[in-house]
Amino acid sequence: MKKIFFVLIVVTILFSCKSSISEVNHIIDKEFEIYKVANSKATLVLFPCFPCDIENTKNEFPIIEEANKKGVSVILMNYNFKLYLKDSELQNLSKHFNSIFENNILSTDNVYIGGFSGGGNVTLLLSNYLIKERNSIQPKGVFIVDSPIDLLGLYKVAEKNIISNFSSESVEEANWIIDKFNSEFGNPKDSISLYKKFSPYTLEINTISNVENLKNLKIRLYTEPDFDWWLKNRKNQKDEINSYFIEQLYNDLKIKGFQKIELINTKNKGYRADGTRHPHSWAIVDKENLLNWVLEKN
């Protein structure tokens, strides 16, 4: 009798596990992956950093399992190598976004979009466009993780990094930025109009035109202002790192009536998955806290 009772318990446990796993529908496409839960309470969309992909997001920000347990479906985007979006790219990405939700029968009732580094720029620009165009997908909230939101500021910091020639990594990145932006926008000494047009934020001329439609959304700006780390490892000053521009954006948006915006400055949380200390990391985001924010009522 005890043996039979034990077998029944094991079968029940296995069946329960199988049922739990089967409730998550894993959909794989070369451009995205979906972890869709039954009776989803929300959908969380994540954009990777500039040179990154889905696997990088999974590795550096392992939120999927926890999200699914809380009833949140997750979409991981492979849309990368972007710091800004041209008009045609905004149109194409929004159409692609719609097709992902429509073809995979995902609810658009409670959508949150976020991204790390360049993915945060994509998040802001796309979300602003979706609201402006009254798209069928209207995000309830957006968040960025240490994103280079000011393209003009990024250009000028790149110039300084080349002159200082302190870090080979910074110099290589800076040369790419100068070449790319000169090709796309021209030298800002001649005109900054295109920098303003494509940048989420431009501190020098105090413009928020590319995020102004986000005013009624919940917004989180994550960053880790470890000034000592940046000075020691990149020889960057306080006003030359992403944290500085993000804080200025926060201040400007608050002044202009954005009521649901949060600036989340972390300390000593920035570590890469391999254990390397770096304040520019997905790890500065508290996953459980983020999910609670996604699920809380507006």
Image: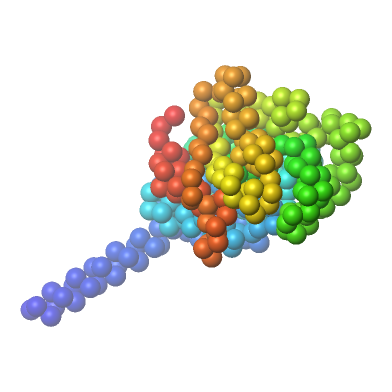
In front of the other: 38 or 276: 276
Q: Quadrant of residue 256?
A: top right
Q: Looking at the picture, how far across and down is residue 271, in whole percent?
A: 52, 56
- Residue drawn at x 63%, y 52% is 232
- Residue drawn at x 63%, y 36% is 244
In the picture provided, is 290 more to the left or to the right than 214? left
Query: Can residue 223 be seen in this snapshot?
Result: yes
Query: Can residue 102 be seen in this snapshot?
Result: no
In the picture provided, is 189 more to the left or to the right than 251? right
In the picture provided, is 56 more to the left or to the right than 153? left
Q: Looking at the picture, how far across and down is residue 247, in whole percent?
A: 60, 33
Q: Looking at the picture, how far across and down is residue 221, in whole percent?
A: 56, 37
In front of the other: 109 or 262: 262
* Image quarter in which the C terminus is found: top left
- Above or below residue 174? Residue 218 is above
* Image quarter in which the N terminus is found: bottom left
- Residue drawn at x 57%, y 23% is 254
